[in-house]
Amino acid sequence: MYRKLLLFAALCLGLPGGYLAQLQLRGNFHPVLEGVAYRSAQPSGDDLDRWITETGIRSVINLRGEHTGTDWYDAEIAASARLNLVHYDFGMSAGKALSQDRAQQLLALLRAAPKPVLIHCKSGADRTGLASALLLAALSQDEEMAEAQISFRYGHISIPHTAAWPMDQSWEALEPWLGFSS
């Protein structure tokens, strides 16, 4: 009896865990809107090379903020320069709500960035999900399509009081401003 229960529990935990692991191994790279915007986890130089070839990406928005002197950031800046990508830093935290003023700033950046644009954070799940949802809302996509960007499909775990729950709360608070009912 306990073995069956243990096996069932392992499957229940293992399948979602395996899914999340494969997202990260593949860079969590997905189109937000083909030819306009793509989303990912922290890209390597090789990732950027490949994704530019596949999609024609012209700019990168880093939602982790400027971190000069760290390996990941310096490598991203060097790869962006080598590949002639326009690079932007927009620091935000998955653990803190995004205000309407900051959302306006992010949308202005998303609109101004040369297209197609790559939006990324560390895992490509939480901050990137909210930014992608905001972009789709600004491009007059329906609420369901926009909100789907903040979902388990991309690795976001939407559970109250977890580390990234403020991204869900931000979306709910911004929906009326975006023209959606909350």
Image (cartoon, rainbow, N blue to C red):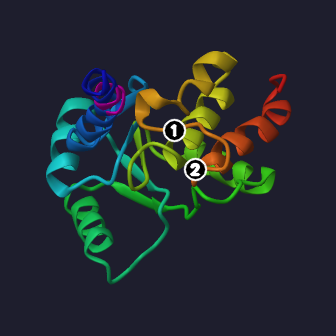
Dividing the image into 4 quarters, which one contains the C terminus? Answer: top right
Residue type at mark 1 is: Ile
Against 42, is 139 above or below?
Answer: above
Relative to 56, 49 lies left or right: left
In the drawing, what numbered circle is on residue 157?
1
* Percent of width and height locating residue 72: 28, 68
Against 173, is 59 above or below?
Answer: below
What is the chief secondary structure element of the magenta stretch?
helix
Relative to 15, 37 lies left or right: right
> Residue at image x 32%, y 54%?
42
Q: What stretch of residues is rendered in magenta?
A: 9-13
* Quadrant of the rendered image containing residue 135: top right
Neighbourhood count class around disc 1 (C-alpha, 10 Å): few under 14, some 14–19, many 20 upward = some
> Residue at image x 38%, y 49%?
123
Q: Is residue 53 magenta?
A: no
* Percent of width and height locating residue 143: 69, 19
Neighbourhood count class around disc 2 (C-alpha, 10 Å): few under 14, some 14–19, many 20 upward = many
Could you tell me how far apart the alpha carbons at marks 1 and 2 are, in whole angstroms? 7 Å
Name the residue nearer the viewer: 173 or 76. 173
